[in-house]
Image (cartoon, grey):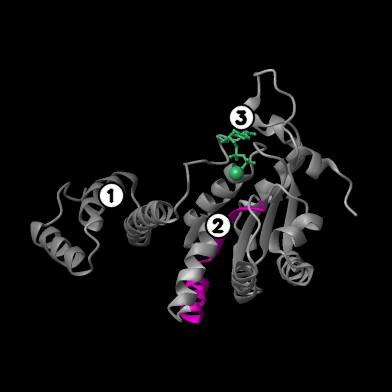
Amino acid sequence: MAPKTPPSDAVKQIHYLAAALKAPRITEAAARLADQARDAGWTHEDYLAAVLEREVSARNASGAAQRIRWAGFPARKTLDDFDWDQQPAARQQVTALASGAFLTEARNVVLLGPPGTGKTHLATALGVTAAHHGHRVMFATAVDWVARLTEAHRHGKLPAELARLRRYGLIIIDEVGYLPFEQDAANLVFQLVSSRYEHASLILTSNLPFSSWGGVFGDQAVAAAMIDRIVHHADVLTLKGASYRLRNRGIDTLPSVRAGIDQPEA
Ligand code: ADP
Ligand code: MG
């Protein structure tokens, strides 16, 4: 039977080599898995694969945690804490999106629906899954995106900023339509959408149907051109029902915005 403890020279060498590779977890995994490998009679290949797998999954996990921290989500939300009984029609589509395939295909997702129906929740949860799939993610409201792009434009750095943002696999634009945009702002959002078209994904959320976006962007032509690019390769999900925030509070409907969304589209 093979000795239980390997020669200590080899262990020292593993320490040294793992440090040189900047993979310190290998030292720990190598020792622990070596015992397991001897007991279970693993091949050399099985053992090496197991050690490397630990390092890779640890790196992926810490990378994802970092991407999630940097994404700027307003709150931590996941698909696991979404109550599908409230939105049964969206379940299948959202679950399919969570595979992350839409990101590699640079497809978009549009979440429409009245306030409190889970648009921001689902956009965040899909952003979290994107981070786990290895994509960089940035979340902000439409108003915040406009502020950021206006700032870049003022310093003559809009093209550089748009190029930088293209390195993010996913950009989330939350709350399109809560506030109307000035013409300049609408053009900046249009440029953001154009620069990502067929390159990288967007998720947009809005309480307004597409037919009302002309009013938001102050210009039917800009809105139409933008919607055209967004929707060309997109999943559009319409969430329905009363606000989750108001459930069990005896309030059935919210004013105006619900009326807007319930109106049949022209
Ligand atoms: P919206 O962006 O559509 O206005 P949010 O996603 O912000 O709505 O949802 C409002 C609150 O209700 C959030 O705290 C969210 O996590 C929660 N929420 C909404 N829908 C659901 C749901 N189906 N299951 C669990 N929580 C939900
Ligand atoms: Mg929201």
Quarter holding residue 155: bottom left
Q: Secondary structure at mark 2?
A: helix
Give, as a single range, the part of the protein colored magenta: 158-177
Q: Position of residue 260 (x, y in %)?
A: 79, 44
Dot 3, crowdedness within 10 Å: few (<14), some or many (≥20)?
A: few
- Relative side of 214 to 35, left or right: right
Residue in the foreground of this view, choosing between 67 and 196: 196
Q: Is residue 160 left or right of residue 250?
A: left
Q: Label 2 sits on what residue type? A: Val
Q: Residue at x 58, y 42 (%)?
A: 121
- Name the residue that disc number 3 marks: 245
Q: Nearer the viewer, residue 190 or 66?
A: 190
- Residue 155 vs 51, above or below: the answer is below
Q: Is residue 19 left or right of residue 109?
A: left
Disc 2 or 1, which lies upstream in sequence?
Answer: 1
Q: Which residue is mark 2?
A: 143
Report, in whole angstroms, how far the alpha carbon at label 2 lies from the one at label 1: 51 Å
Q: Quadrant of ligand 1?
A: top right
Residue 205 highlighted magenta (yes or no): no
Asked if residue 19 lies left or right of residue 127, the reply is left
The amino acid sitting under disc 3 is: Arg
The residues tagged by marks 1 and 3 sit, at their Cα atoms, a distance apart of 49 Å
190 vs 37: above or below: below
Q: Is mark 2 within 8 Å of ligand 2?
A: no
Instruction: State which tag comes first along the sequence, 1 or 3.
Output: 1
Pinpoint residue 190: horizontal percent, then vertical percent: 65, 71
The nearer-to-camera label among 3 and 2 is: 2
Please, what is the three-letter code of the amino acid marked with disc 1? Leu
